[in-house]
Image: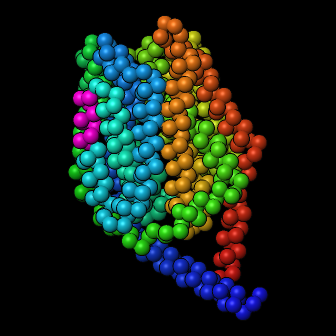
Amino acid sequence: MTSGAASAAHSRADDAAAQEVARRAAAAQHAGGTPGAVPRLAVMMFLQYAVWGAWLPLAARYMTATVGEGGLGFSVAQMSMLIGLAGSVGAVSAPFIAGQFADRYFPAQKFLAALLLLGGALKWITASQTGYDAWLWLSIAYGVLYMPTLALSNSVAFAHVADRTRDFPKVRVWGSIGWIAASWVFPMIWLQTALHATWMPPFLDGAERPDATAHLADALRFSGMLSFAYAAYCLTLPDTPPKRDGVQSLAFARAFGLLRRPSFALLLLAGLLVSMIHQIYFMQAGPYLVHLGLRDSDVGPAMTVGQFSEIAAIGVLGWLLAKTSFRVVLAIGALSYVLRYLVWSQVQLPVPVLVGSLALHGVGYACFFAASYIYVDRLAPPDIRHSAQTVFGIIMLGGGPVLGGVLSGKLAQTFTGADGKLDYGPMWLSLAAFAAVAFLIVVATFRDETREADGATAAAKGTLA
């Protein structure tokens, strides 16, 4: 090694050591967290996902129901592109709004409140629109406003909990509970009358209003009201000041370098397939459940079966990863999608069986999506982990919804008969085939590279010591 190279190496080691000291000092300073923050953050997360769960499960049904039924009369292809494109544009823009703009110039809780206030107004306006173009552009605008709030709410939570590993799951689980609550409450208030107690969730049921389909538009107004309430609540949250020095200009470019890692590239390939068919679930589940004979007021509560299983699956995810491996867990996630769509393709099965199989939705989400985020966090070097998650999210949540929208429209055109009715059996079977390809990619080609990354980190720490 030349003297210049040695000097450069020592300089890098000194810089790394200084960064490590600073990191440990910051961690020690933050170790106590914000006193009493967890309950306040739990309410925040409850509202975060209640805003979403209030309208998303019912949107596809409202858009594709005929005008005579009280819906908008959009084609399946139009509905698929609208939901897919809005979600994709929102996901792609979110990192730049939340990371490059909000994190640098405004307190996170105040910027979160502003986005929610504007988003709630857009949802309220959208509820009164009947034209496809108006719905498309308003939905895209809403996606740009809402999707960054997911990252911002996480940032606020991480900034104030004492122990991320211990406390964040306690906060995040209330997001799933919020989604469930909104999906239960809306039909009780807007779609049903003469409520009475029942032993089946949501434990209150009633006769469906004759104009229930037309009142699905009120789901957007309900979401808007929740958004306004959430915006007001954000102003009571602990202050989370901007991190002006927290953004590294080269981190984003370096994160794309992870594509040279075979496991990262293969995970993205399998993940893109899973993201496509995951998005189609939200596009087609509502109309499918009504096709099976469920009432419009039953759709939201029925789909919360997936959220209940998601809570349970995420609860055991850490244990599962400790006992098995990433490849096994990811394979379980992909296989859950295969099984769920295989079951749904058998439309002659009893309706309780078809609805009960929604439990596989939560297993698939936890074991594939949540496990993928954990894998990326472990694979990426510490200084680019946030940017690596951003790159992963842009491809998974940006590309997946658009491709899913296109695929949903193509499948609907292929399997719609001369009578204008969609044959759901072969459509779900096609999605099972896509999931099977993702499963085979994971089982046959994926190899855990985090151990190598952990070894390199340990070696670096040994050098510093």
Left or right side of 181 for 353: right
Residue 203 occupies quadrant: top left
Counting from the top left corner in percent of width and height, residue 391 is at 54, 55
Comparing 224 with 330, the one in front is 224
Which residue is at a point 45% across and 22% down the rendered structure image? Answer: 76
Give the tally of numbered discs: 0
Q: Check residue 247 for magenta coloring.
A: no
- What is the magenta segment's predominant secondary structure? helix
Q: Above or below — where is 340 with respect to 398? A: above
Quarter of the image that includes the C terminus = bottom right
Answer whether residue 296 is visible to the viewer in this image. no
Residue sitting nearer the eye, 201 or 236: 236
Q: Which residues are magenta?
A: 120-129
The residue positioned 63% from the left and 61% from the top of the image is: 257
Q: Can you give x and y, in whole percent of width and height, for residue 235 in the image?
A: 24, 57
Query: Is residue 242 shown above or below 418?
Result: below
In this rendering, would 459 be left or right of 194?
Answer: right
What residue is at 71 percent from the left and 68 percent from the top?
455
The furthest residue to the top = 419
Is 124 situated left or right of 100 in this image?
Answer: left
Q: Where is residue 25 shown, x and y percent of the image?
A: 47, 78
Q: How is the image coloured?
A: rainbow
Which residue lies at the image location 51% right of the left edge and 50% below the top edge?
A: 394
Task: Work out which residue is located at the far front of the displayed protein and give it.
Answer: 133
Q: Position of residue 194 (x, y in %)?
A: 24, 16
Q: Quadrant of the N terminus?
A: bottom right
Residue 264 visible here: yes
Front-most of 380 and 184? 380
